[in-house]
């Protein structure tokens, strides 16, 4: 089963659960009955354990109102130096922290 998101112009968004690949382009709004169009949204993908996922969400919510102040780049330890990945040659010329 998959969850599909639809948007009604009057009542906003709502979710509909259907078999994968069977969602129509529009459905009736459960609140007012008018036509609601399907919205393409980001899939809910999880990786890692539930505890790590919950901790990441809690940390994001906390930092929303109480941002952390960082004064230096955190080290990875003596045996594991921080490695900088170069994405493009143009970015390689930028100053590093």
Image: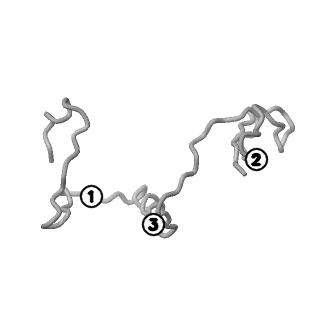
Crowd around label 3: few <14 · some 14–19 · many ≥20 (10 Å): few
62 horizontally vs 38: left or right: left
Who's the residue at 57% across and 51% down the image? 44
Query: What x and y, as percent, mark residue 27?
Result: 81, 36
Query: What x and y, as percent, mark residue 87?
Result: 26, 37
- The CA distance from mark 3 to mark 2 is 29 Å
Figure label count: 3
Query: What x and y, as percent, mark residue 10?
Result: 76, 35
Q: Return the residue at label 2.
A: 19
Q: Quarter of the image holding residue 62?
A: bottom left
Q: From the viewer's perspective, is residue 71 above or below residue 91?
A: below
Q: Quarter of the image holding residue 68?
A: bottom left
Q: Return the residue at label 3.
A: 52
Q: From the viewer's perspective, is residue 55 above or below residue 70?
A: below
- The CA distance from mark 3 to mark 1 is 22 Å
Quick check: marks 3 and 1 in contact, CB under 8 Å?
Answer: no
Sequence-earlier tag: 1 or 2 = 2
Between label 1 and label 2, give the one nearer the viewer: 2
Residue closest to the far right:
33
Viewer-proximal residue, 72 or 91?
91
Between label 3 and label 1, give the one nearer the viewer: 3
Q: Return the residue at label 1.
A: 69
44 horizontally vs 33: left or right: left
Between label 3 and label 2, give the one nearer the viewer: 2
């Amino acid at each position: 089963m998959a969850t599909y998101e639809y948007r009604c112009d009057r009542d906003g968004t709502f979710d509909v659960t259907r078999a994968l690949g069977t969602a129509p382009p529009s459905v009736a709004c459960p609140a007012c009955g008018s036509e609601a169009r399907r919205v393409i949204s980001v899939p809910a993908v999880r990786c890692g354990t539930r505890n790590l996922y919950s901790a990441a969400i809690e940390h994001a919510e906390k930092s929303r109102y109480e941002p952390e102040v960082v004064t230096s780049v955190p080290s990875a330890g003596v045996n594991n130096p921080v490695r900088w990945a170069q994405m493009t040659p143009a970015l390689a010329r930028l100053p590093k922290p």
